[in-house]
Image: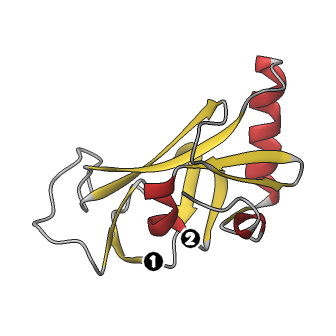
Amino acid sequence: MIDKTETQQALVTMTTAASAKVRELLEQENDPALGLRIFVAGGGCSGMQYGMTLDEEQEGDAVMEVDGIRLLVDEMSAGYIAGSEVDYVDSLMGAGFTVNNPNAVSTCGCGHSFKTANDSGQARSCGCGH
């Protein structure tokens, strides 16, 4: 189990743009129990993929507050995304969240899929065109 006092330091950080967008989404939900859950799951073209959702705290979560936003990370995901930065990009190519992960040795051009040094297996197509 993750010690919440240890996770108060920056397990994950957010850019100003990401904070503003998450705050907007949380205000639309109008539920003070919600925070931003950031997680990692198997799949995607590089072996692992990021996920984000508005959720309530679960047992075993690392919980930290960044710019007044509660970030929730499950124990398994914490090891993969420690030190990452969440950003929100709005460009001609589209808008969405991206994760800048120092643990990733390769990433897909879509910004949603990555591979770490400990991953094995072949890259798979996720349909993002990269």
Find disc 2 in the rendering and name its residue.
82
* Residue in the image at 52% along x and 50% along y: 74
Q: Which element carries disc 1, helix, strand or loop? A: loop
Q: Is residue 70 left or right of residue 78?
A: right
Snapshot quadrant of residue 2: bottom right
| Disc sitting over residue 103 in the figure | 1
Q: Is residue 51 above or below residue 121?
A: above
Q: Position of residue 44 (x, y in %)?
A: 27, 51
Q: Quadrant of the C terminus?
A: bottom left
Disc 1 marks which amino acid? Asn
Q: Is residue 29 above or below residue 34?
A: above
Q: Which element carries disc 2, helix, strand or loop? A: loop
Q: Position of residue 55 (x, y in %)?
A: 63, 30
Q: Is residue 75 left or right of residue 67?
A: left
User: In the image as oriented, which residue stretches furthest toward the left?
Assistant: 122
- Report the front residue among 126 and 69: 69
- Report the front residue among 4 and 83: 4
Snapshot quadrant of residue 47: bottom left
Q: Is residue 91 visible?
A: no
Q: Position of residue 109 (x, y in %)?
A: 37, 62
* Residue in the image at 82% along x and 45% along y: 69
Determine whether label 1 and label 2 are within 8 Å by CB: yes
* Residue in the image at 23% along x and 71% along y: 119
Q: Nearer the viewer, mark 1 or mark 2?
A: 2
**Looking at the image, is mark 1 or mark 2 earlier in the sequence?**
2
Q: Position of residue 18 (x, y in %)?
A: 73, 51
User: In the image as oriented, which residue stretches furthest toward the right?
Assistant: 68
| Disc sitting over residue 125 in the figure | none
Q: Is residue 15 visible?
A: yes
Distance between the alpha carbons at the discs numbered 1 and 2: 8 Å
* Residue in the image at 33% along x and 63% along y: 108
Q: Quadrant of the N terminus?
A: bottom right
